[in-house]
């Protein structure tokens, strides 16, 4: 478990290409091409990537992206829940786990690592990136088990749940 670094970009591209169509559909904070990866991580003050790497194969088996602050198009909706977003202490989070590694504890392990890392940076709240599909019970259970709370629901290509975790 570690932060993503530029030497991982080719491996990250391979990871993204090998995700199933369903996993790609549920994880879409950026395009799945190499240029999008390069463009996204040009500014390390705005985006952080985290990876879990299989030590035997050196392949990425889980990947999460964090945006410092929140997504501009989510701001009004977040404020409608009474949330006062703070650019300095909030981040937006999108996790993924390779299909063959799902339900093995990899997502929990990477998320625990990320939370420890974020506490040292002054981040106090984690907001889900564009929410989670309301019908994705597996993901919702993961978030609830890890301390997220439901803020509300919104409609975008189906019903979605906005969730937030307060780090202490």
Image (cartoon, rainbow, N blue to C red):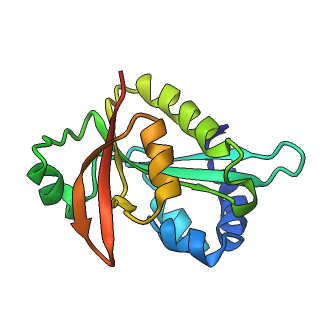
Numbered-mark total: 0
- Compared to residue 90, the image places residue 168 above or below, namely above
In the rendered view of the protein, which quadrant contains the N terminus?
A: top right
In the rendered view of the protein, which quadrant contains the C terminus?
A: top left
Q: Position of residue 110 (x, y in %)?
A: 61, 39
- Compared to residue 13, the image places residue 102 above or below, namely above
Identity of the residue furthest to the right in this view: 56
Can the viewer see residue 76? Answer: yes
Identify which residue, 44 or 138, lies in the foreground: 138
Q: Position of residue 94 (x, y in %)?
A: 46, 54
In-image side of 121 versus 82 (left or right): right
> At x 66% / y 60%, what residue is drawn?
12
> At x 18% / y 42%, what residue is drawn?
85
In-image side of 102 versus 94 (left or right): right
> At x 42% / y 66%, what residue is drawn?
135
Can the viewer see residue 41? Answer: no
Identify which residue, 109 or 155, lies in the foreground: 155
> At x 24% / y 60%, what residue is drawn?
153
Q: Quadrant of residue 158?
A: bottom left
Q: Position of residue 125 (x, y in %)?
A: 31, 35
Q: Position of residue 81 (x, y in %)?
A: 13, 49
Q: Quadrant of residue 101?
A: bottom right
- Compared to residue 133, the image places residue 6 above or below, namely above
Identify which residue, 118 or 7, lies in the foreground: 118
In-image side of 69 versus 30 (left or right): left
């Amino acid at each position: 478990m570690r932060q993503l670094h530029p030497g991982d970009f080719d491996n990250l591209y391979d990871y993204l290409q090998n995700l199933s169509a369903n996993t790609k559909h549920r994880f879409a904070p950026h395009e799945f091409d190499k240029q999008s990866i390069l463009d996204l991580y040009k500014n390390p003050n705005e985006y952080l990537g985290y990876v879990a790497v299989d030590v035997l194969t050196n392949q990425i088996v889980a990947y999460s992206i964090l945006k410092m602050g929140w997504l501009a198009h989510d701001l009004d909706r977040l404020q409608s829940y009474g949330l006062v977003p703070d650019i300095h202490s909030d981040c937006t989070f999108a996790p993924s786990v390779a299909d063959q590694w799902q339900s093995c504890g990899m997502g929990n392990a990477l998320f625990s690592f990320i939370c420890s890392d974020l506490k040292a940076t002054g981040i106090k709240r984690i907001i889900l990136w564009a929410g989670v599909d309301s019908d994705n019970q597996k993901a919702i259970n993961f978030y609830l088990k890890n301390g997220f709370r439901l803020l509300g629901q919104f409609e975008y290509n189906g019903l979605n749940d906005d969730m937030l975790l307060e780090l202490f």
